[in-house]
Amino acid sequence: MNQKLEKFKQIIAEVTDLGRAEALLGWDQQVNMPKGGAEDRGNILETIAGISHKKFTSSETGELLEDLKLYAETLDPKSDDACLIKRMAHDYEKRTKVPSKWVEEFAKVTTISQGVWEEAKSENKFTLFQPHLEKVMELRREYADFFKPYDHVYDPLLDDFEPGLKTREVQDIFGKLRPQQVELLKAIAAKPMIDDSFLHISYADQGQWDFGVDVITRFGYDWNRGRQDKSVHPFTTGFGIGDIRITTRFDPDRAASALFSTMHEAGHAMYEQGVSETLRRTPLANGASMAVHESQSRMWENLVGRSKVFWKFFYPRLVKIFPQQLGNVSMENFYKGINKVEPSLIRVEADEATYNLHVMLRLELEIALLEGTLKVKDLPEAWNTRMKEYLGVVPPNDREGVLQDVHWSGGMIGYFPTYALGNLVSAQLWEKINQDIPNLESQIEQGKFDELLGWLHTKIHCHGAKFEPQTLVKEVTGSIITPEPYMRYLKSKYSEIYNL
Ligand code: CO
């Protein structure tokens, strides 16, 4: 069996290398590549993807996995080998159940539909996009059907991002969360608006860059195994445990946006920098799921980066870089400004109190579209009705409404809930961390984060993608994902800020 395991690991290592090469080309595409390189880059990526797919889905891999699945049952279920075999068997089944004819058609349809979506968005014309979204939804329904029997048609899609998580579980969580968030938002809306005008003046790029670097260096982002560059949309990517990179962007009139996005991406990156060496060259050298990944980025961005204790240490440093902009703004007012709640139309600009509502609306619509209880042509109206109900605002046009996100045009159905789940997991972990490190707040106030990062490394990061998200969260916090810690966090934070 040892020989078979070694052979299997060799194949998986090569598949992982090919994936890393794709990631590196993708990084270069967004950071360095001249515009004219798009076509050539597309060809290279397609070739690598083809080789990797063939290698992974070969009958040799399948036969090895059949034998190894039996072998894995004799191992400690928490061992690296048992987890690798289990995860690869799951991925193999998912990859091989989908006919290549479907994969090709899906690629073609979504490439076209993304182009049309851009046009529809800029012309504010949903009807342009409608037939393409209908096709995408039809293909996604077909995709789900390759995995029959399922409890819910959305399950196989959700599983691509949150292994093992069921639609019913997410609906349960969101069902409890939504009324509480709506209620909190109403209470805040009845209070006077916070003035954050000092955030919407010009801040020089270099100062934003320097401050961001200072913050994430103190967080513990390892520059020896990473770097930061600029890109249009900030992201994190990695080519192995020893090379996890982040990007950022600057908007001179929205300084807070770059600052918090740098902390966010560093949170993602420190997760992958913390994966155990023993998982090198395997797909387990990654996050447990999108939600767990997002829990790490959100924790550094919000629970740490938008807290008062954090700014007690960092605000004087920020004022030193931007004396003209902030010299006359007290720390208290700055803190309130970066935590201002305002129901808005656009998800990516949403604050902590409203963000999840944007996500819940999208999940409900995705499910209704897949189930067929909502027709694509009725989508804009359904969108606007929910916006009014949950957030109290109605988009004046589809560009700022149903057409705002790229996800659906690219066929990414099942991704949205992971954003909100990430918020919930971050608060759930935070409660546990504060039990384990009782003086965490005073450490943060002194700009010290090593004990926090160490806790995350030991409890979350080192495991990589060995465990399914619910298993990992339960192991660490004693409960599967639940909305209560997040609601406790929001209520206590905003009660203080808004005098509720
Ligand atoms: Co993120």
Image (spheres, rainbow, N blue to C red):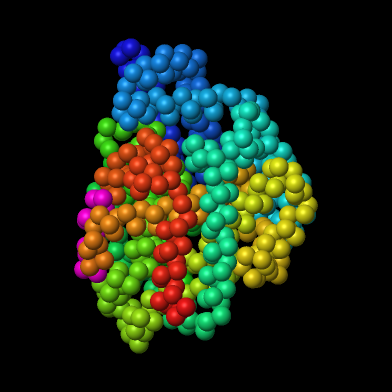
Residue farthest toward the bottom in the current orientation of the protein = 328
Q: Which quadrant of the figure has residue 378?
A: bottom right
Residue under the image location 22 percent in, 55 percent down: 451
84 lies above or below 303: above
> Which residue shows up at 50% across the image and 54% down it?
420
Say if 427 sits above or below 25 in the image: below
Front residue of 66/12: it is 66
192, 266: nearer the viewer: 192
Q: Residue at x 48, y 17 (%)?
A: 62
Residue 279 at x, y percent in the picture: 31, 33
Q: Quadrant of the N terminus?
A: top left
Instruction: Name the residue nearer the viewer: 357 or 301.
Output: 357
Is residue 163 shown to the viewer in this render? yes
Relative to 430, 175 lies left or right? right
Position in image of residue 250 (x %, y %)? 44, 66
- For the question of whether residue 252 can be seen, the reply is no
Q: Relative to residue 321, is residue 252 drawn left or right?
A: right
Q: Nearer the viewer, residue 34 or 496?
A: 496
Vertical comparison of 37 with 43: above or below:
below
Q: Position of residue 154 (x, y in %)?
A: 62, 40
Q: Main secondary structure of the magenta part?
A: helix
**Which residue shows up at 39% across the image and 44% down it?**
474
In the image, which residues are magenta? 443-455
Q: Position of residue 57 (x, y in %)?
A: 51, 22
